[in-house]
Image (cartoon, grey):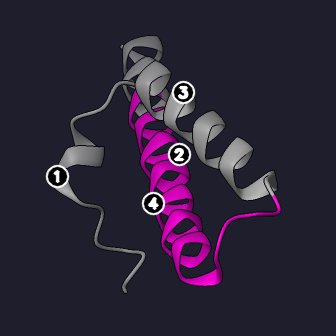
Amino acid sequence: MKIENIPADIKSKSIKEARDEIDEILSKLENQTTNLDESENDYFRLIQLNKHIDEMFKKKFKEISEKKND
């Protein structure tokens, strides 16, 4: 699974929605009764959600910087 390719369902999430899903995944991963295959999928989704949030912050920062320079 490539981390760089963020699925459309993640790209459509707001920062709050992505954070909420991250919190759910973290709670699930902290549960010791989850199986390894499921945990691996959750971990990759977690990374994709985090990357999506990072890209949204970078985009917003760029917009703010451009407005400030005008």
Label 1 vs label 3, nearer the camera: 3
CA separation, marks 4 and 3?
Answer: 14 Å
Residue 65 in view here: no
Residue nearer the viewer, 61 or 37: 37
Our reading of the magenta stretch's main secondary structure is: helix
CA separation, marks 1 and 2?
Answer: 16 Å
CA separation, marks 4 and 1?
Answer: 11 Å
Secondary structure of residue under mark 1: helix
Q: Position of residue 50 (x, y in %)?
A: 55, 50
Residue at image mark 3: 20
* Earlier sequence position, callout 3 versus callout 2: 3
Residue at image mark 2: 54
**What's the residue type where badge 2 is placed?**
Asp
Label 1 vs label 2, nearer the camera: 1
Q: Badge 1: few (under 14), some or many (20 or more) residues near its Cα, within 10 Å?
A: few
Secondary structure of residue under mark 3: helix
CA separation, marks 2 and 4?
Answer: 10 Å
Kindly identify the residue that appears in the image at 37 percent across and 84 percent down.
2
